[in-house]
Amino acid sequence: MNKAEVSALFAQQFNEAPSFVIASPGRINLIGEHVDYNNGFVLPAAINKHMYVAVSKRNDHQIVLHAADIPQNYQTSLDNASQPSNVDWPNYVLGVVDELKKDGHAVSGFNILITGNIPIGAGVSSSAALECATVFACKHLFDINISKQAMVQIAQRAENNFVGVNCGVMDQFASMFGKADHVIKLDCADLSYTYFPFQLENISIVLFDTFVKHSLASSEYNTRRQECETGLAALRQQFSITSFREATLTMLDAVADTISKDVYHRCRYVIDEIARMEAACNHLLAGEIDAFGARMYETHTGLSKLFKVSCPELDLIVENCMIEPAIIGARMMGGGFGGCVIALVQTTELETVYNRINAVYENTFGHSMGKYVMQIGDGTRVLN
Ligand code: GLA
């Protein structure tokens, strides 16, 4: 969508032109899953699908929201904005307003229209995109002097404190800092980052959508985080380490008797994945794309067997990718329990392999799987 289209939707609703229109993308992640909240590295990129918000100031202290795609309205006052709504979608906006206020930034009443083309519930972070769009819109509307890093952290805290998902920083960072044709190697310990060019000749980044709607807020995500914290606490009792970054499998084995089997498996996955991500980046730099793909498959196995965040639909797709020579690597992506598989596929073979895997998928689950070819795009920005 362009500025004129979003502005027209805004004018229909609010009878005026918006002051700013912001685009904020969803994200993919090539490797480094469930390690952002464990001080690991991740390798995400922004995609060419966005949430859009259009905003204007009001003369009163009301926040008036319109979600154009549902369509639904919601209204509250600035004073009551710290109160999460019973309806989900306004919370992504109100959570950001609440965090801005907590940081002492001056915010007054505003109108906001929300629209977008990011598939919801597919694991490509439509929620982070909306949070980043909102904080970026507030920065411009209220002339707030704030860095991109600080906006990322506000967006993440909105999700943690208001939406109730104890997520890490990856999604909001990728949405805000995305750069066309580049993946971001992000050090989640200190938010330092490097852009890597990612343009592979004749290879497409494809998402296969299970259409199983994952609900991260549904306790499992928070449980995994809790299990990792329990494991780290046990490791720190015996070793002078601060995070999983310094942990080794030898250390984990030394504390195995003091933790449950589940916690052992979660930690085992995290330690493997942190090392795997480093190896995968080296493969990418050396142009060893097949080795990179092999690491993706290993990540899937770890997420499925040790971290236990996969589901039969995701597993079936990845198992079938493994037997396709035209697929370089594939794995479930994001929080898990549904959503998409990310796969690197030889472009000329895409239709053929999709049809073959989809036939098995349809036969097993009674409905087809989705297919989206991803382009890597820019991060959160004002549309001119
Ligand atoms: C979700 C969270 C992220 C990250 C991924 C798993 O997308 O929002 O912070 O933990 O799951 O890597």
Image: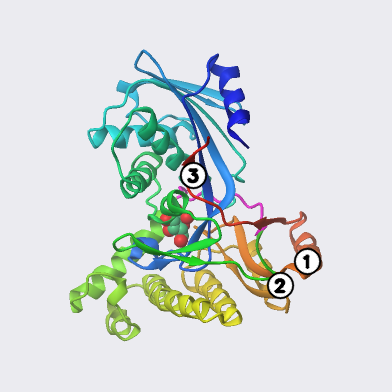
Q: Position of residue 105 (x, y in %)?
A: 26, 32
Kind of element beneath mark 1: helix
Contact? badges 2 and 1 (CB < 8 Å): yes
Q: Is residue 129 left or right of residue 39?
A: right
Q: Residues within 10 Å of mark 2 (few under 14, many from 20)?
A: some
In this figure, which residue is indicated by the disc labeled 2? 320
Q: Is residue 245 visible?
A: yes
In this figure, which residue is indicated by the disc labeled 3? 129
Kind of residue at disc 3: Ala
Kind of residue at disc 2: Asn
Residue 308 inside the magenta-drawn segment: no
Quadrant location of the N terminus in the rendered image: top right
Kind of element beneath mark 3: helix
Q: Is residue 209 visible?
A: no
Contact? badges 3 and 1 (CB < 8 Å): no
Q: Between 142 and 154, which is closer to the camera in this rendering?
A: 142
Could you tell me which residue is drawn at 48 percent across and 22 percent down? 74
How far apart, in angstroms, are the residues tagged by discs 3 and 1?
A: 33 Å
Q: Residues within 10 Å of mark 3 (few under 14, many from 20)?
A: many
Above/below status of 217 relative to 271 = above
Q: Earlier in the sequence, mark 2 or mark 1?
A: 2
Kind of element beneath mark 2: helix
Tag nearer the camera, 3 or 1: 3
Q: Earlier in the sequence, mark 3 or mark 2?
A: 3
Any mark on residue 334, and which? none
Residue found farthest to the bottom? 250
Magenta stretch in the rendered image? 208-218
How far apart, in angstroms, are the residues tagged by discs 3 and 2?
A: 31 Å
In this figure, which residue is indicated by the disc labeled 1? 360
